[in-house]
Amino acid sequence: MNWVNAIIQGVLLGGLYALIACGLSLTFGVMRIVNLAHGDLAVCGAYLGLVLSTAAGVPVWVTLPLLLPAAFAVGVALQVLLLGRALRHGVLAPVLVTFGLSVMIENLLQVSATSDPRGLNGGALALASLHIGSITVSWLFLTAFLAACVVLSGLQLTLSHTSWGRRVRATSDDLDTARLVGVRVLRVFAGVAGVAVATAALAGVFIGTIGTFDPLTGANTLIFAFEAVVIGGIGSLWGTLAGGVILGITQGLVGQANESYAVLAVYLLCLAVLAVRPGGLFTSRQAAREVPAAGAPG
Amino acid sequence: MSESAVDTALLEVSGLDVFYRDFQALFGVSLSVPRGGATALVGANGAGKTTLLRTIAGAQPAASGFVRYQGSDVTAAPPYQRISRGIALVPEGRKLFPSLTVEENILVGASAAASNSWPLERIYGAFPMIARRRRQRASTLSGGEQQAVAIARALASGPALLLLDEISLGLSPLIVGELYETLSGLRSAGATLLIVEQDLRRAMDACESVVCLFEGRVALAAPAADLTREQIIAAYFGQDRS
């Protein structure tokens, strides 16, 4: 029964990994930016939740209608003011900029919020659990998993079936041509960045209610998100969800056998996927194909 | 250029210099496209034809000179603004969005539409060969079908000026014939065409004026009826007409 339990916990944890990872995947898929500050932005979401819920004296869930639009706005502003400018100077510049952003966020948080670990007020949900036979499932984990499923499938449906989604996919396929046929790619970028930071902030809120967080939590978060994206394949949100779940199950099962190898096993799995299927387990050949660079025709 | 030519020109390009970093692709290119006509843009590979079309469409910045469309200066306007005024480009190599379906490709073309004069039904009517493929990924189509989708994507923006870059490249003469028939239909519907075409005979048949570029400069610009094949070929290779 312990093994079944490990798998269930792993699946639920995987949902949270996927929620963190989907913004990373989207940002890379559309803007070709590897956002090294993504985990730190998630932690910022947790701190913002902490400030708002403490000030209002309510569980952090109540603050989401304010927190998520604020995170979206931060994402838009980051893209327009910082990353968009960096993108004009080649592929490396945005990587350096997001690395710098990560360092800055971590240090600013340490200065302003100290490095004490914090937790978020999850209200009644944080204490409730569901008993199925001898297995106990925390409602909080279940909610995080369901939220991840709703967010990822909502995003996937939006990308597949709306005109905004069509423009995002066209931009991801071929930026130069998208611009040429009238897509306002800077607006697409801003929207995608907003969604990415909003999902990161939501993930941050779950991280903060499930466990504790401190200014340096972002770095670890980023690594897990990366691994979910690598395993699932870049640009495929279903793949990201599956990647997160595989990550969670691996961690759960190995942890059941020997806790000290759990994280190592995840890294090895990620390495194996990179070696065998560098495009990820769930991408078609189409999506894994390198997007042709905009050439200079004669 | 006479006064009357300026008055009736839909598109007027003047003194255009365009660079790719240090490489200058266009040198003071001037050209006038009258409303309602078809102009062929010919020249050897690397003469600057694609660059000129991309500059007119807004994909390539001009270092100097101007692009005037319907009497207003659009030299600095981004592509979506030019599209919403009625300039659309069918790029060289078709450049469809491979992961999108045929219909999605066409709908993306309508993102900044100038008018809704080309709803999907009308587009499918003009290109019956792609109507039955509308739900297929663009990357699964044949070359001719892909070219038709690329033209359809440009039409979806309701253009008054259609720029077509090498639409017959790599296609069978039969398909090319069909495409040109569709183009002549567009002309009768009032569209103005600027066509880059390697096949000189087809270019001279389809267009009433010919502009030949040589090494980034206009080597020849005249009504097709006034030109012989030999004159165009001479300009093509940069030989002085004497």
Image (tube, rainbow, N blue to C red):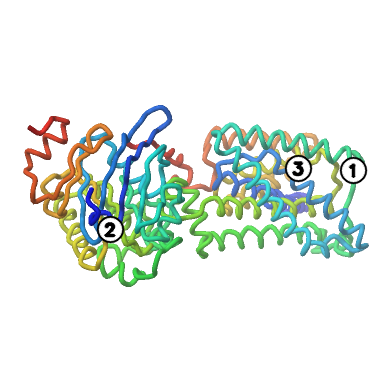
Mark 2 belongs to which amino acid?
Answer: Asp
- Which corner quadrant of the image does residue A112 belong to? top right
The furthest residue to the top: B22
Label disc, if present, on residue B174 of the rendered structure: none
**Mark 1: few, some, or many residues within 10 Å (few <14, many ≥20)?**
some
Look at mark 3 in the image and give the residue it sits on: A40
Asked if labels 1 and 2 touch by Cβ distance under 8 angstroms, the answer is: no
Q: Secondary structure at mark 3?
A: helix
Mark 3 belongs to which amino acid?
Answer: Asp
Look at mark 1 in the image and give the residue it sits on: A113
Q: Is residue A11 visible?
A: no
Q: Residue at x 80, y 50 (%)?
A: A207
Look at mark 2 in the image and give the residue it sits on: B7
For the residue pair B136 and B184, the one nearer the viewer reads as B184
- Which corner quadrant of the image does residue A70 belong to? bottom right
Between discs 1 and 3, the one toward the N terminus: 3
**Mark 2: few, some, or many residues within 10 Å (few <14, many ≥20)?**
few
